[in-house]
Image: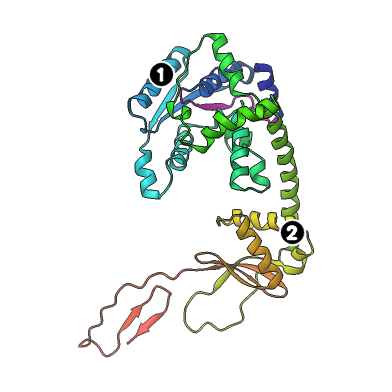
Amino acid sequence: MIDRIISFVEQHRMLQQGDCVTVGLSGGADSVALLYVMRELTPRYCLTLTACHVNHQLRGEEGDGDEGFCRILCERLEIPLSVRRIDVRHYCKANKLSIEEGARELRYRALREASADKIATAHHADDNAETVLLNLLRGTALDGLCGIAPVRGQIIRPLLGVTRAELENYLNGIGQDYRTDRTNLEDAQLRNRLRHHVIPLLRKENPDFSQGILRMTEGLRGDRGLLERSARELLERAALPPRRRSSVRLTGLPDSAQAASWDRQTLLAQPRPLRLRAFKLVCGEFGLDFDQERLLRLDRCLAATGTLQLAPYWRMAVDFSRAALLREVPLEPIPPLSIDLDGPQLQEIALPCGRILRI
């Protein structure tokens, strides 16, 4: 198993000599196996290895037991451990997130704060297969079928090429125990129901199911990369200089600024999948939310001309010759003004827009 993991790490260029790597350590079988694997890889890459445990404060004494287990394990293996305690419930309530979403967001934030360089997480081939099935059930495009990325920014996933059963067998072979989160044994979450009931049926048809999904996702990620490169080239080829507005500004109100614009006919000459990928890159670059339906609306707007509101202060405007992404600069609020009617005949008040109000 270790040789296959090394081959996977080399294939995706996850590690370089002298890297500092922080292992996300929950205390479960997957993360404990990851800690041991990274410990074995440390001499090969001259790594500086640390670990970080995030206590979500959701499971009371059981969660505290996970924290204590991680402390003892890292002390025995002589691996520095950072422990972060986060109030997930309060954060989710304040930000209107589900517990799962909020916990994931805060967990990665804590790992980034604890890490000087790379973060290793314990996602494996079965996690990847579950993620693809979840995306299929919810309805997905190409990105959802690409599964979990082996490398995403500073996050690396060395175990993505092996299964959960292989990791548990590895730990049994070295005599290392681990913690079990009881919530993972329940069927309340859709992912757990897929894990307990659906995937075992699929494995009866194909015992190599998770590895088959892994091969599919790796192939589709290559297709996606080629599509994205073509979309970037299209945007560069179609790019136009910002149009200067000719209207005379009388009100002092800000105009809509063109964040970017493209030649409409150049975009329309390309196949729809390429245009949709180009729109997706544009939304990502400017931090705009998108889904497949919004990308399709953008494409319909490009074909028919007109405007489409994308977000507060952001819209796409399409005329016969160009498609322009416009950002409406919000005005600064004007505070209440107090005027002394018995004061001087002429009063001047400076306004935030740079004009002077004379009374």
For image coordinates 66% across by 22% down, the residue present is 5
Residue 78 counted in the magenta span: no
Q: Nearer the viewer, mark 2 or mark 1?
A: 2
Magenta span: chief secondary structure:
loop
* Residue 200 in view, yes or no: yes
For image coordinates 61% across by 81% down, the residue present is 246
- Mark 1, residue position: 69
**Closer to us: 290 or 53:** 290
Vertical order, 319 against 140 (above or below)? below
Binning the other alpha carbons within 10 Å of mark 1 as few (below 14), some (14 to 19) or many (20 upward) gives some
Image location (x, y in percent) of residue 190: 52, 38
Image location (x, y in percent) of residue 256: 55, 72
Spatial separation of the CA atoms under disc 2 and disc 1: 53 Å
- Mark 2, residue position: 272
The amino acid on which the numbered mark 2 sits, given as a three-letter code, is Arg
Q: Residue furthest left?
A: 342
Left or right of 126 on screen, residue 108 = left
- Dividing the image into 4 quarters, which one contains the N terminus? top right
Q: Residue furthest bottom?
A: 345
- Discs 2, 1 touching: Cβ within 8 Å: no
For image coordinates 55% across by 29% down, the residue present is 196
The amino acid on which the numbered mark 1 sits, given as a three-letter code, is Phe
Give the secondary structure at mark 1: helix
**Closer to us: 80 or 272:** 272
Magenta residues, as a range?
12-27
